[in-house]
Amino acid sequence: MRKIVLSLLGILIVVASFFGAKSIVNAKKSIKPIAEKVIKTVFSMVVTNTSIPILIPANGILVAKRRLVLFSEVQGVFTGRSKLFKTGQEYKKGEVIIKINDREFRSSVVAAKSNLYNLFISIMPDLRLDYPQLYPKWHDYLKAFEIEKPIADLPKMSEKEAYFISGRGITSSYYSIKNLEERLLKYQIKTPYQGILTDVQVTEGTLVRVGQKLGEFIDPTQYELEVAVSKTYADLMSIGQKVDLKNLEKTKSFTGKIERINGKVDQNSQTIKVFISVQDLNLKEGQFLEAQLKAMDQPNALEIDQSLLVNGNQIYAIEDSTLKLIAVKPVFYSDNKVVLKGVPKGTILLAKPIIGAYSGMLVQIFE
């Protein structure tokens, strides 16, 4: 009896322990709260299709439209002027910018004129005897002849008179002197327009040689911007078309116009060179500018941020407080914008992208 009683007590203790442990475990279970549905507030826009101008972005570096590269055609010592031959020096139109010592060559020109003068004197007696009617004309020419000044043009001559003058070597000497006078003019260079020196290769006292580069001179009021544009848009641009320009920091705006369009396509990049002229006193050569070339107007189109585009050809529309993907047709991409076709007028679109957006997502429009 004792063993039976102990066995029954053991079984009862085990069963009681099991149910006691189970009740303790159940007492520790926490009730999970039901998650509330979060409806995101979004920005929206209503589609109003209009004519969108297609602007082609391009960039380039400004260069002077009128540039004079200075080279020497004669040899001599570079002599100083009242203005220093330095970078940044300004000159007026017709002002002497470069002067090379011409004393030696000038003396040879004077000597050649003196020889021609002697030839004229030698024919005067023969003219008085053989051609008395021609004598006054040549006497007046000889009387006005000045060795230190540019030689005057020869008087008009008849055929017989020309044979006589040429036979004495006067005509050949005359044209030789004209050639020397033209060369003498090359010892100084005058500015063809008002401008500024941008590059200097010599200084006062330098021995200048034939063909040596002396510097560069530009007109700082007229510039040209060379940009490369895809050949796809070549037919959409025309000479004289206005172009909007901005500096690299986008703090200043300028207006230019297309002056030239190259007729050749670059084989490597498949682009065409377009040259834009611009005038502004705030511009400098070498400055980087960005251009917006108007190619065409896209009718019945919509322009949005590229960040709103999904999978390249879809955007989110809002219908009954629910996001829905609709198909669109992108026709042009810019830096951060895209022009779309095929969006029905009056459609409500998502105006700003939201994180985790999906088709069927509940949203509410921010009023």
Image (tube, rainbow, N blue to C red):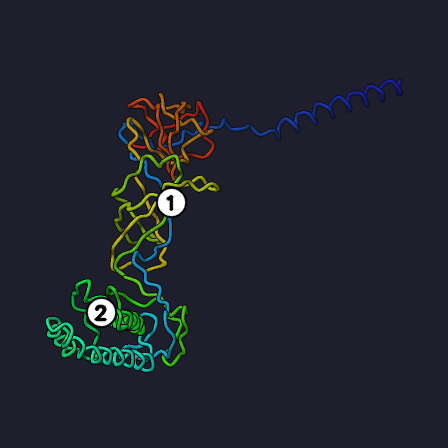
Q: In this view, does 283 lie above or below 233?
A: below
CA gap, disc 2 to disc 1? 61 Å
Q: Residues within 10 Å of mark 1 (few under 14, many from 20)?
A: some
Residue at 28 percent across and 39 percent down: it is 238
Residue 63 versus residue 14 in the image, above or below: below
Crowd band around label 2 with a 10 angstrom C-alpha radius: few (<14), some (14–19), many (20+): some
Evaluate whether residue 97 shows in this view.
no
Q: In which quarter of the image is the N terminus?
A: top right
Give x and y (percent) for residue 223. 29, 55
Residue picked out by circle 1:
273
Quick check: 135 left or right of 73?
left
Secondary structure at numbered mark 2: helix
Residue at x 25%, y 56% (from the top left corner): 280
**SS class of the residue under badge 1?**
strand
* Nearer to the camera, 312 or 176: 176
Residue 3 is situated, as x and y percent measured from the top left of the image, at 89, 20
| Front one among 305 and 293 | 293
Q: Position of residue 241 (x, y in %)?
A: 26, 42
x and y, in percent, of residue 309 in the image: 42, 31
Q: In this view, does 168 lie to the left or right of 139?
A: right
In this rendering, does residue 318 appear at all? yes
Front residue of 14/91: it is 91
Q: Is 366 in front, or is 306? A: 306
Dot placed on the residue nearer the N-terminal end, 2 or 1: 2
Residue hosting label 2: 164
The image quadrant that residue 179 belongs to is bottom left
- Which one is in front in this view, the residue at disc 2 or the one at disc 1? 2
